[in-house]
Image (cartoon, rainbow, N blue to C red):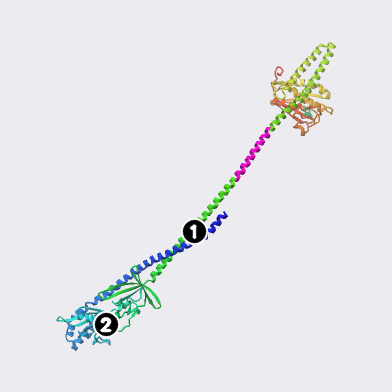
Amino acid sequence: MDGLQFMHRSLAPGRRLWAALVLVAVAAVVAVLVGRLATRAYLDEAAARGQTTLRLAVAALRGHMNRFEPLPALIADHDDIKELVADPGNAGLRARANDYLEEINALLQSSDIYVMVPDGETIAASNHQGPASFVGGNFSYRPYFQDAMTGEQGRFFALGTTSQKRGYYFSSPVRIGGAIRGVVVFKVDLDAIEASWMGGEHAIFVSDPEGIIFMSGRPEWLYSGLLPLTADRLARTQVSRRYSDAELRELPITGRTVSDGRELISVETGDKVREYLALAEPMPEAGWTVNILTDTASARAQAITAVAAALLLLGLAALAAAIVMQRRARLADRMELQRTARAELERRVEERTADLALVNRQLETEVAERRATERQLRQTQADLIQAGKLAALGQMSAALSHEFNQPLAAVKTYADNAAVLIDRERMAEARDNLARISGLADRMASLGRHLRNFARKPNEKLGAVPLADTIRDTLEIVAARLKAADACVNVDLGTLPLAVRAGSVRLQQVLVNIISNAADAVEGREGRTIDIVARRKSGKVTITVRDRGPGVPAAIAERIFDPFFTTKGIGKGLGLGLSISYNIVKDFGGSLSVGNHEEGGAVFTIELEAARLPATEAAE
Ligand code: ADP
């Protein structure tokens, strides 16, 4: 990732430079294009405005002059004038004509009206009374006089040689009987119109055919030439003395261009050069051209504003583009980061997977080892069982002799007694002894069968076993042992005969074991009484065997029912008695437990299901 970031960083300045160059190029192109378009548009607008102003100026001029145009002919037709030109020397007629002209001039608000005779001398004038009276003046050099003398209506504009006032001259011949005997001239003042051109956005002026400015809204431009003042031009102007003695000069034009059909001229005014849009409309009837110059400064300023706005827009667009690009770049970076992170994650997952696979393989190996170990264990267990079986077989043999010793001792006693009784011919008693021997033999056979079935569930059927008989038989078996221990037994079976659900031989076996243990426990002690108590309670019969021995310590209480657990010395105990007894009682569906009596001694409790007492002895 670091490498990638470095790459981005190292590329960025180059890209930025490129972007800046492109932006500058685009800006230049935009500036030029927008500049051109905007300049053209604003100049068009300025031109339209100028054109309107020009039209208005032309219309005003034309209207003004049209008002006066027919007047000279009208005056020339007046009787007083006609009479005067017919008799120019008549002082009365002159005075009348002077008054008339003065009156008409005041009425028509024209500049001057005067009458000339064919040699050019002025014989009557509206300003006959003023200091600059035209009377006596000769204006034969004026084209309007020459035109009128040829019978035409004359028109001319010029600076008055006498009045030094500019004006427009209309002239008309005075005919008497078809001959031209004089000329009436009407001079119209143009100052009012010129005054209306002063100031304002546009420079309006009138130029003569030689390009010299005759009327102008800018007084400083008067008598300036739009065209170079060549000798020809000056000579032609001199002939008509249009400008009297006024000083002619050239307009300080520093540049003149024509583009898109527009004429642009630069004029030096004061110490500044201003650019103007030049428009002109010729007025052929007046013999001049009306010009209008519109300052292009505002159009150019507007164009510059447009360019600035366009550049601003471009800048904003570039900024937006830059932001978008930066965002994109950031997004790309982020995506790259995510991609890298994903790749890293995938790599880690792969690593983990590989680790897991390794662990898995290890586990499989372990499982295989475990299985092998388990197999080995089973084998060992089987071997152990086999060994255990062999050991048990040996112990069983010992147990057998242990279990058989007591009845055998009884048999021997009965047999010895029987022999003595036969010697004394006490046959009945001897028979009784033999019967007992036979019974004991049966029991031993049964015991053998039982021991044989020690490991398996015996086939002996369970039935109701009368408790009184079983205990009586048991006591017979253990009588020798009890006697040897010098112990006495108290039996309390309650008032009602009790029966339990069991197998009688095995129940005897259980009782023999427990009573034998009790005898062992009390042997050589102070109290050697063993209590056997049986009680029935809610469908169960409880048989307790209590001795007055040392009792069973809590530490071994749980283990005394384990096979081969014994505290007795070698050759004395096998530790099988209680284990067998426990299993037998369990087979009967009952329970065997041990506890200690509060006054000392162990208490073994056999709990069995109560049974209904049968008529005969339970089946074995
Ligand atoms: P063995 O009598 O061959 O030792 P048992 O299974 O009959 O085998 O008894 C196991 C052990 O239980 C005895 O060794 C003895 O320690 C203990 N025990 C059995 N009965 C009594 C009793 N009445 N009082 C004290 N301890 C007893």
In this rendering, the answer to whether 101 lies above or below 204 is: below
| Position of residue 295 measured from the top left corner of the image (x, y, whole percent) | 37, 72
User: Which image quarter: residue 447?
Assistant: top right
Q: Residue furthest left?
A: 177
Q: Which residue is mark 1?
A: 323
Residue 389 in the image, given as x and y percentages of width and height: 73, 26
Q: Which residues are magenta?
A: 351-375
Instruction: Identify which residue, 192 or 182, lies in the foreground.
Output: 182
Q: Earlier in the sequence, mark 1 or mark 2?
A: 2
In the image, is residue 451 above or below residue 324?
A: above
Q: Quadrant of residue 232?
A: bottom left
Disc number at residue 239? 2
Q: Nearer the viewer, residue 536 or 471?
A: 471
Q: Residues within 10 Å of mark 1 (few under 14, many from 20)?
A: few
Judged from the image, the secondary structure of the residue bearing numbered disc 1 is helix
From mark 1 to mark 2, how far is it between C-alphas? 76 Å
Residue 618 left/right relative to 345: right
The residue type indicated by label 1 comes to Ile
Q: Is residue 366 magenta?
A: yes
- Residue 351 coordinates in the image, percent (x, y): 60, 46
**Mark 2: few, some, or many residues within 10 Å (few <14, many ≥20)?**
few
Q: Position of residue 545 (x, y in %)?
A: 77, 26
Amino acid bearing label 2: Val
558 falls in the magenta region: no
From the image, which quarter does the C terminus lie in? Answer: top right
Tell me which secondary structure the magenta stretch mostly adopts: helix
The reply to whether residue 466 is in sight is: no
- Left-right relation of 137 to 225: left
Name the secondary structure under disc 2. Answer: helix
